[in-house]
Image (spheres, grey):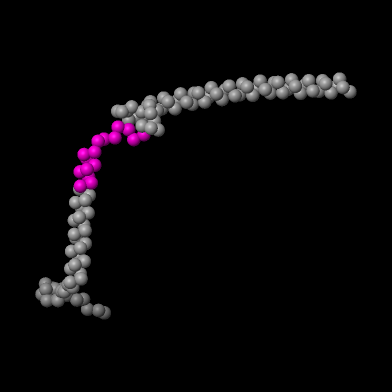
Amino acid sequence: MQKIKELSEEKILGTKFSLSIQTMIAAGTGLASLVGMWYALQADIQEAKELPVPLSLFSQEYPSKGISDYNWSPSYEQYKQQISQLQNDNDEIFETMEELQQEISILKQQVIDLRIKVR
């Protein structure tokens, strides 16, 4: 078994502790860079506080969005209107398609009748 080493204040204070010049310079440089970053961050925060509040980040994409409107209701209404228009266009296309199908069936029947007459 290993003996447990006792740590006492006398033993700790009696040990030799040394720092090299390199270590002290590195610690000072690190501390100086941290302090510099702290002040730069504080300056950036203060500058951001002084900037005007953006009225709308999406004003070009969503022109119907008002200045104080944060719930996107005008854009929602705009989308509803666009979807309604698309549905109407789709209905018109289906009606045209049905008419064309009827004309095709009439033309097919005429071709069949003409074949019968030619024979």
Above or below for 12 versus 90: below
**Residue 69 is a magenta residue:** no
From the top left corner, tell me how far across and down residue 42 is, in percent: 20, 48
Above or below for 17 versus 82: below
Above or below for 92 versus 40: above
Residue in the foreground of this view, choosing between 74 and 33:
33
Q: Is residue 89 left or right of residue 7?
A: right
Q: In the picture, residue 3 is in which quadrant? A: bottom left
From the top left corner, tell me how far across and down residue 57 is, in percent: 34, 35
From the top left corner, tell me how far across and down residue 70 is, in percent: 32, 30
From the top left corner, tell me how far across and down residue 75 is, in percent: 40, 28
Q: Residue at x 42, y 25 (%)?
A: 78
The quadrant of the image that shows the N terminus is bottom left
Q: Residue at x 21, y 58 (%)?
A: 33
Q: Residue at x 29, y 35 (%)?
A: 54
Q: In the picture, residue 89 is in which quadrant? A: top right
Q: Which residues are magenta?
A: 43-58
Q: Is residue 8 left or right of residue 52?
A: left
The quadrant of the image that shows the C terminus is top right
Residue in the foreground of this view, choosing between 4 and 72:
72
Q: Residue at x 21, y 39 (%)?
A: 50
